[in-house]
Image: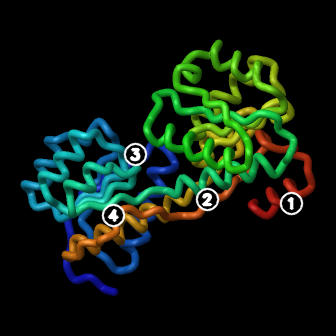
């Protein structure tokens, strides 16, 4: 379907990691289908200021697509401006209640945690299971931990939570990893946290994955391929999030207001590497050969 009007859209996307880059790819994939946006791209959270949004509104912006988590203050400003907005983020219930012209698009955290739980339990060898939050205790990090714990509880398994205070204190983290019953499995909030866990395991003399298997989330190859050993990771469909967010924003800028305000999208998969399995296994070698 060809669109004959050009919309001015402010897009915020953190391009320092794989998630932001793939979300942006999803946005451009949507536009390649015949839609015309004049995009102003903001790349860092520090640049997302009240002044930026107010100026954009005063200069006739048609829509906002926010792929960088925002403060409550910025959410309130979005609501007061009344301009169609799609957030690729965890839902903010107050924003949804007060701002009709907004929707939230996010990865399916239940699917991510279900995939991770199945990956750990399929080996049937681990005696303890842990979840490591990120270093700053972000809301999305806690949410993933809550859902993973609930998924494991359905299977009769208890999950030990490793909070931000342990992630930032190497001695505390090492103590937790040394004290847990072996073999152990650790799901980390995202790949950077998983890399920290791997590093502490090595310093503590723990074998990976024989003593501790480690699984990240995000599949950022800049991280996963350069840890020792290479890091297994759950790969969400970030590109689909960008595509779906663009589709919803396009619809709102054309005047439609959806009754559905929250969208979960994308299917996850585990990209297995040496941090969770024996890299000499024939099935692993076949998988790697096919991937290559």
Q: Does residue 256 appear to the left or right of 135 in the view shown? A: left
Q: Look at mark 2 in the image and give the residue it sits on.
A: 268
- x%, y% of residue 83? 17, 60
Q: Nearer the viewer, residue 263 or 93?
A: 93
Task: Give residue 14's mark.
Answer: 3
Estimate the spatial distance between the alpha carbons at disc 1 and disc 3, rounded to whole Å. 35 Å
Sort mark 3 into few (<14), some (14-19) or many (20+) by Cα contacts within 10 Å.
many
Which badge, 1 or 3, comes first in the chain's sequence? Answer: 3
* Tag 1 and tag 3, C-beta contact below 8 Å: no
Q: Residue at x 20, y 54 (%)?
A: 98
Residue 39 located left or right of residue 126 = left
Q: Where residue 173 sits in the image (x, y, percent)? A: 65, 20
Q: Quadrant of residue 229?
A: top right
The way the protein has been coloured in the rendering is: rainbow
Q: Which corner quadrant of the image does residue 243 belong to?
A: bottom left
Specify whether 206 is left or right of 88.
right
Q: Secondary structure at mark 1?
A: helix
Answer above or below: position of 112 versus 195: below
- Confirm or deny contact between disc 1 and disc 4 (CB under 8 A): no
Can you tell which of label 1 and label 4 is closer to the viewer?
4
Tell me the distance, in whole angstroms, between the alpha carbons under discs 3 and 4: 23 Å
Q: Earlier in the sequence, mark 1 or mark 2?
A: 2
- Taking depth in this image into account, of 37 and 277 the one nearest to the observer is 277
Residue toward you, 135 or 24: 135
* Residue indicated by mark 4: 261
3 or 4: tag closer to the N-terminus: 3
Which residue is tagged 1?
286
């Amino acid at each position: 379907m060809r669109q004959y009007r050009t919309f001015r859209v402010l897009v915020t996307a953190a391009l320092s990691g794989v998630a932001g880059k793939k979300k942006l790819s999803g946005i451009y994939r949507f536009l390649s289908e015949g839609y015309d946006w004049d995009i102003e791209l903001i790349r860092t959270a520090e640049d997302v200021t009240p002044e930026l949004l107010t100026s954009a509104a005063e200069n006739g912006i048609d829509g906002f697509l926010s792929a960088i988590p925002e403060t409550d203050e910025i959410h309130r400003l979005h609501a007061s401006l009344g301009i169609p907005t799609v957030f690729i983020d965890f839902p903010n219930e107050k924003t949804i209640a007060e701002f009709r012209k907004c929707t939230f698009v996010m990865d399916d955290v239940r699917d991510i945690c279900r995939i991770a739980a199945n990956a750990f339990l399929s080996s049937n060898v681990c005696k303890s299971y842990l979840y490591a939050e990120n270093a700053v205790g972000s809301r999305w990090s806690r949410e993933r931990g809550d859902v993973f714990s609930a998924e494991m509880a359905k299977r009769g398994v208890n999950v030990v939570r490793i909070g931000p205070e342990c992630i930032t204190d190497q001695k505390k983290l090492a103590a937790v990893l040394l004290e847990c019953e072996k073999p152990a499995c650790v799901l980390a909030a995202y790949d950077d946290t998983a890399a920290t866990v791997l590093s502490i395991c090595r310093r503590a003399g723990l074998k990976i994955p024989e003593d501790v298997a480690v699984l990240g989330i995000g599949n950022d190859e800049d991280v996963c391929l350069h840890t020792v050993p290479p890091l297994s990771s759950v790969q969400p469909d970030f590109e689909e999030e960008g595509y779906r967010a663009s589709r919803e924003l396009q619809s709102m800028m054309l005047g439609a207001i959806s009754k559905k305000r929250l969208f979960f999208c994308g299917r996850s998969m585990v990209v297995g590497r040496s941090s969770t399995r024996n890299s000499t296994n024939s099935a692993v070698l076949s998988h790697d050969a096919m991937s290559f």
